[in-house]
Amino acid sequence: MPQIQNEQLFRHALGEGMNFFLGAGFSVAAKSGGKNLPVGDGLKTELLDYFQRPKPSGLTLSQLCQIISSTRREELNDFFRQRFTVEEFAPEYSHLERINLKAIFTTNIDDLIPKIFGSSQKYYINDVAMRGPVISGGSAIDYIPLHGSVLHGDGKYDFSPLEIASSFDRDRDKWFGYVSRIQQTPTLYWGYRVEDAGVLQSLSKETAAGRSKAEAWIVLRSKDAEAIEYYSSLGFQTIIADTVELLRYLGQLQVKKVAGATKSLVGKHFGEFQIPPLAKVPVRSISEFYLGGEPTWYDVYSGKIHETEHFTAAKNAIAGPKHVALIGGAVSGKTTLLRQLATRTTGFGQCLYIDEITPEKATLLARDIDAEGQPVLLFIDNAADASEAIQILTKSSLIKVVAAERDYVFESVAHRFPQHQFIELDVSGLNGVDVQAVQDRVPNDVIRRQYDRSQDELSGDADPTFFEVITSTILKNSLADRFMQAVKELRSSNLPQHDLLLVACYCYACRVPISVDIGAAFCRVHGLSAEDTAANLLAMGSVLSPYEGVLADTSQDYYVPRSREVSELVLRKIPPFELKRMLEIFHAEVSTTKIGRYDVFRRGAYDSQLTGRAFSKWEEGLAFYERAFGRDSSHSLKQHGALYLARKHKYELAFSWIDEARGMSKNNSAIRNSYAVILFSANAQKPLKAEVIDSLDESMRILKRCYTEDHRKAYHAKIFADQAIRYAKKLPESAAAVTYLESAATWLEAELKVRTSDRRMRQLRREVAVELRALK
């Protein structure tokens, strides 16, 4: 039996909530390639043998890795992937499910923890490095691989306390966040020797600097008096046990039962997805909706929002054999329609509403639904963010998915919604009957005028959207007007609140809520504490709302502006110098590990259109992207940087960045698309020579392959059509110009059969037709 110092307190912590901090000794009962994972100097010995280096060696592990990676990096990465991809592990590891785990820190690069919980009925692993901290859901365990992980696929591993320290120096907010977790929650350190204690000693110093510190235990394999004395001096309590022995001890623990807990697995693990009844939702005036606020559950329950023809069409599609994708332009009523369907669709099983879900969480949800054996109808907003999760959910025969997304965003993930599985419904336009009905529902206390359909040449003969009808009807006091007025007033009266509002708009435009953690990190420049920041966010109720997605237990509050469209408008309207200031402070002060669903956030956070406004001087923009790459060394960030540089006409630099992005990714069609666009733009302004024409043709060939080989047809068709028009203007005598335009016309026509309201495609079709007539 393990010898545990203060055992009753330890058992209490295991039940109430605990962090694990794992080293190599934790993984000793796991195997890869038939061999146990290495501990101590075992990895160094294996590297010396594998790369045929002389033994013995006085090099440290980190020094040895540096030398090998300088000449044989790919081989080294392949070795690590193979050696630390776990193939089997002791069954005793499953006893970890009996513990109330909050977070797992690890200096191991293996995938043992994700494998242990891969078939769990209770928990799923949320990798903070990939997705940021969990926003909602009591079934998540935040997983923090400090040295990197074979699951990340980037080949970046740190093997010394010095390397970890340097990574924290680049991102001090990440360090503060990790230390804060250890201060607040008891932590078990498992798998370390005295020689490995550099990180633990650093943590001890950080947490002892005049602040309270939660209990901490460390597991020692044997009763070593000197080791016990050393760790006691750092503030640790000791447990004497080997790994399997302690795992067996955990298997004897009684699982804490929650009084009155529902018997439903879905209800128990995913309460945040339950649709709230009318009696439990806050009420508000319906005028807020018509003035530009996003729909609340009360708005939908009130019956004061018109059900358009798309409502019946969507119900008809739900009754069919396929899953359903509702696509449309910005503020075309997709979320409203989705919530109307969620509250008024019966007979297809239990209805759940989801606006944020990771693949790991989806795996656990699908497992619960299959275990219960009852059909479930899942209404999922922000489908692009959840596209990987949706792929997992649709594998269950008991699940039907109804997902909603903006059309141009949907294009980027269309390959995950194949047409043999999904029926796509374009819900953008309103017919004449719906337009009149929407107008009739606008409350009398809203100052309005007679609706007058605008003659926008982009829209052509497309039906107007809900947004267009409302903005043409509302005369004043819209939410957008109020937001811009608030920004202006706060700039002179309360700078911290002004900045928090801009940060909230930035986060929400990037599809994540602002948390107190994010706000507090930013507001360090104002000398504010986390408590001050929380009070400021709470005081901004006229423009910020509590995040509705958080219905499960969370350790902090989250907020969102009252409309994503308004958030985007604020970023477009504020002076460029304000946008630049906010972006520079945000990315200097706020760690990526503080941003919930960072994998979603990063797609919009570094967008070249946004940074193009903020950084008018390309040198400043380049510096911004170079600093950002120090924290997020992904191919997508390189792609954003390349597009920014191309926007600033720095084509040679842009080409270098996109070429690096292409080298970092494997067969990524979006990267290839950007590569082709930059290649074309870099040569389109140059004098016509044979090599210039060859480059333009190469760009067109790449785009053609993107269209034919990738499922994102609409996305590639529009890019190809735009370049075909530019090619024809540049080379009107070329036979290739006619061929490109004919291909573009065919593809646009095919895509418009599905995307009937896509105005950009309609405009391109007209422009292509004009160019073809001119050439023929």
Image (cartoon, rainbow, N blue to C red):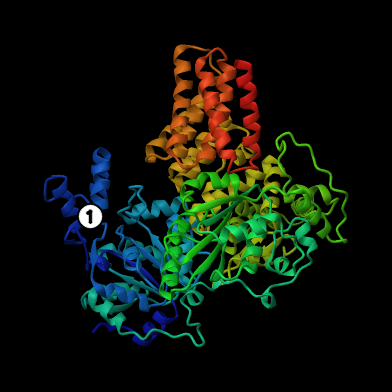
Q: Secondary structure at mark 1?
A: helix
475 or 483, nearer to the observer: 475
Amino acid found under the numbered disc labelled 1: Arg
Q: Which residue is mark 1?
A: 83
In this image, 248 relative to 128: left or right? left
Q: Residue furthest left?
A: 55
Is any part of residue 620 visible from this angle?
Answer: no
Q: Which residue: 53% across, 16% down?
A: 686
| Crowding at mark 1 (Cα within 10 Å: few <14, some 14-19, many 20+) | many
Residue 40: image quadrant is: bottom left
Q: Which residue: 47% across, 31% down?
A: 703
The quadrant the N terminus occupies is bottom left
The number of discs equals 1
Q: Is residue 639 above or below residue 99?
A: above
Residue 723: image quadrant is: top right
Q: Position of residue 470 (x, y in %)?
A: 78, 51
Q: Position of residue 224 (x, y in %)?
A: 21, 76
